[in-house]
Image: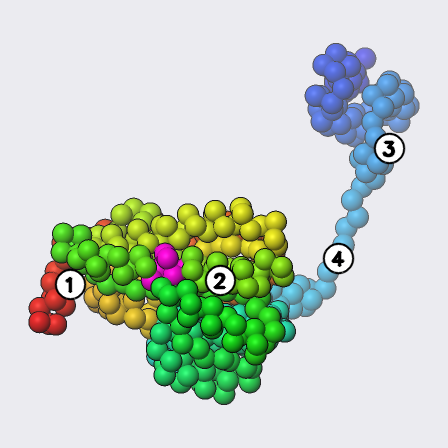
Amino acid sequence: MSPARRGCAAAVAAVRRRGHWAALWDAARAARRCQATVPPLAHAQCRRRRAGLQLPAAFAAARSRPAPRRRRDPSRRRHRRRRLGRRGRAAMAEQGAASRPPPDVDTDDCLREYRHLFSPDILAGQVAFITGGGSGIGFRIAEIFMRHGCRTVIASRNLQRVSEASKKLVAATGQQCLPLSVDVRQPQTIVAAVDEALKEFKRIDILINGAAGNFLCPASALSFNAFKTVIDIDTIGTFNTSKVLFEKYFRDHGGVIVNITATLSYRGQALQVHAGTAKAAIDAMTRHLAVEWGPNNVRVNSLAPGPITGTEGYRRLGGRFAEEASQFDMIPLQRAGNKTEIAHSTLYLASCLSSYVTGTTLVVDGGSWLTSANNFPAMLDFWAAGANKNQ
């Protein structure tokens, strides 16, 4: 027996001895060598011996058929390389687009330009009740909702502020916006506002709990009344508004509640015991209400922003100070967020895109709470400087 035939027979025997597929690749390679070196008659005998392997027909056909050779026109190859080069340059130009902030303005004014990332009619025909909608994040949420077909009710203690905001929103979007005066600490004002909204629009589909109060203060310097005030506005105000909307409309018609909270309690942020406690309670409330009101087709979620430019909180909580000290470089995305980004995330939670999401908190902070330093001495200096200025 020739060496080639002995090698082929040994490979076949190995396959039979080892099992089924463990040595299949070795057998195929041996068959190739056998085909190249064994005379036609011997090759036919070897092939009959390999018949016991029961190789797949497609594998055997592919193994026995030489791969065709294609000849390309050199000019076409060069053209293809140039075309791929353009694609590569376009891909490089789009690199990082997924984390690039959308346009925004720092003031409480509507966007000068807007490009829809969601379907423009994703909230068509719906009505949103937004507390704290006259400024900051609440104002931008109202604008983005209205740009997606939603009518809004913006409520605040300052009727003049929400009235001026309403005019801007209507002029920019063409949608209806009803300004109302509400103190979320007083349930009777909420009841009156909800009744007026239902009289005007006949429905309320979305509640955004955005009313809040915050400032920097060490716990040792925080008065009892100041702590209570923040709890009353943030935590108790969120419950009051949610309960009134549930009883007035959501119990029978379903709806969506989005609570604007914060990441302050996740690690115990310095000078924020009042706000951190209030927001942590809202996150717990979110889970409880999601469980109880889910059978009524009510979804309840929280959204926790990070440092957001163009807001009162950014100014009061040392955002400019952190920016000048390059503290945002420690954030994974290395920047502060903007109000439009928070509005887009709220739009997701309020729309049918999140139809199976409830009882959760969506953190929108660029990874800030994971990496930013809890710089107590620096924050204390910033608070002291502000306190001296106000004296």
Viewer-side residue, 114 vs 287: 287
Q: Residue at x 76, y 54 (%)?
A: 70
Label 3, on which residue?
57
* Residue 29 x/y as whole percent: 73, 28
Q: Please tell me whether mark 3 sits on a helix, a strand or a loop.
A: helix
Amino acid bearing label 2: Val
C-alpha gap between disc 3 and disc 2: 71 Å
Label 2, on which residue?
244
Dot in front, 4 or 1:
1
Label 1, on which residue?
382
Disc nearer the start of the sequence (4/3) = 3
Disc nearer the start of the sequence (2/1) = 2
Residue 299 showing in the rendered view? yes
Amino acid bearing label 3: Ala
Where, by quadrant of the figure, is residue 180 drawn?
bottom left
Relative to residue 390, is residue 94 drawn left or right?
right
Dot 3 alpha-carbon crowd within 10 angstroms: few under 14, some 14 to 19, many 20 or more: few
Callout 2 touching callout 1 (CB < 8 Å): no
* Residue 213 x/y as whole percent: 30, 64
Relative to residue 390, is residue 259 drawn left or right?
right
Q: Where residue 71 is drawn, which disc sits there?
A: 4
C-alpha gap between disc 4 and disc 3: 29 Å
Relative to residue 277, is residue 62 drawn left or right?
right
